[in-house]
Image (cartoon, helix red, strand yellow):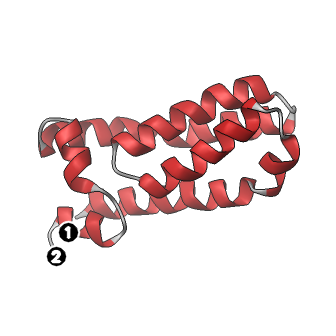
């Protein structure tokens, strides 16, 4: 299986993502930057959630949504969008009750990228 087919088989909208980045080489370079930043971005979300700082949580999760969709990780983008809308409404109950879904999908994306980059 080639690298692009690997992404597609894991639910990544690779064709759109690569066209967003102009070509696969640029996608790979930018994906590496995204991959390196993702754990820190997620840790910021954890801190904002734990401090009930929904204003900054909304900003951070908005960026997560946009970046995920740019790289073709639509499921993460959709989950982050839900969190963005709820955090903007100051719905801390939703954010706390559904945070594990976001965390699990971030881990899934990290796993997909790790495997992709090792190919």
Label 1: which residue?
Answer: 5
Q: Which residue is drawn at the image coordinates 25% and 55% (left, top)? A: 14
Query: Toward which corner of the image does residue 8 lie, by quadrant?
Result: bottom left
Q: Quadrant of the N terminus?
A: bottom left
Q: Position of residue 25 (x, y in %)?
A: 13, 41
Q: Position of residue 46 (x, y in %)?
A: 74, 41
Question: Would residue 83 be found to the left or right of residue 37 on screen?
Answer: right
Question: Would residue 13 be found to the left or right of residue 42 on screen?
Answer: left
Residue 70 versus residue 13 in the image, above or below: above
Label 2: which residue?
Answer: 1
Mark nearest the camera among 2 and 1 is 1
Q: Which residue is drawn at the image coordinates 50% and 63% (left, top)? A: 108
Q: Position of residue 95 (x, y in %)?
A: 78, 46
Query: Toward which corner of the image does residue 3 lie, by quadrant?
Result: bottom left
Q: Give the SS element for disc 1.
A: helix
Is 37 or 99 nearer to us in this picture?
A: 99
Rate crowding at label 2 as few (under 14), some (14 to 19) or many (20 or more) other CA atoms within 10 Å.
Answer: few
Q: Are marks 2 and 1 in contact (CB under 8 Å)?
A: yes
């Amino acid at each position: 299986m080639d690298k692009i087919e690997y992404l597609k088989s894991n639910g990544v909208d690779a064709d759109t993502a690569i066209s967003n980045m102009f070509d696969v080489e640029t996608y790979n370079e930018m994906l590496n930057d995204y991959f390196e930043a993702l754990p820190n971005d997620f840790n910021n979300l954890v801190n904002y959630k734990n401090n009930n700082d929904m204003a900054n949580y909304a900003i951070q999760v908005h960026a997560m949504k946009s970046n995920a969709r740019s790289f073709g990780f639509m499921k993460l983008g959709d989950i982050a969008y839900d969190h963005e809308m709820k955090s903007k409404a100051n719905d801390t109950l939703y954010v706390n009750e559904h945070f594990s879904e976001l965390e699990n999908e971030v881990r899934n994306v990290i796993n997909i990228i790790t495997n992709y980059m090792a190919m």
